[in-house]
Image (cartoon, helix red, strand yellow):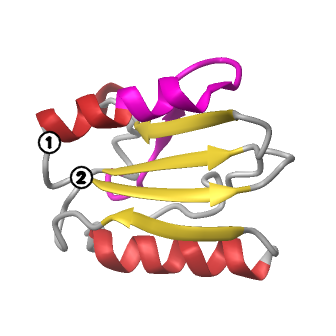
Amino acid sequence: MRLKSSIWVAAYLRRCQTEGVFGAVRKRGAEEAGAVFVKVALLDGNAILYAPAPQTVYDESRPAERLFVSASPQPVPEQSVEERLAKELRFDPDAWIVETEDRAGRHFLDLAKS
């Protein structure tokens, strides 16, 4: 059973906080199962966007985990990330947007599974 999105986001932000990374919910989505997008601002005008992984990458033995993929192989201008997020919200108004700030680009998503 997958955790509610609201619980997952709270745990993720706590993880960021323990590592000294500022993070906040920019847009609150559906409590139960809203998709979560994570923007990592690099504080130099660039950012990395992590989106929910497509269902095809999920392991059948662990279907309840939340997996993420980077929307681009390299950091992109923040404006590009914002345009993508606006498009995602038009498609899915129940989505969550979480933003963190870290010059090193740490995202902790590989450690925040569930």
Tell which of 35 and 22 is nearer to you.
22
In this rendering, position of residue 94 left or right of residue 11: left
The residues colored magenta run 63-84
Q: Furthest-top residue in view?
A: 73
At x 27%, y 51%, the residue is 35
**In the rendered view of the protein, which quadrant contains the C terminus?**
bottom left
Residue depicted at 54% across the width and 46% down the height: 39
Q: Is residue 99 above or below residue 69?
A: below
Q: Residues within 10 Å of mark 2 (few under 14, many from 20)?
A: many
**Which residue is label 1 attached to?**
92
Q: Is residue 34 left or right of residue 113?
A: left
Amino acid residing under circle 1: Asp
Q: Is residue 87 left or right of residue 112?
A: left
**Left or right of residue 33, residue 85 in this image:** right
Q: Is residue 47 magenta?
A: no
Question: Residue 106 placed where, x, y %?
Answer: 77, 51
Mark 2, residue position: 95
Question: Label 1's element?
Answer: loop
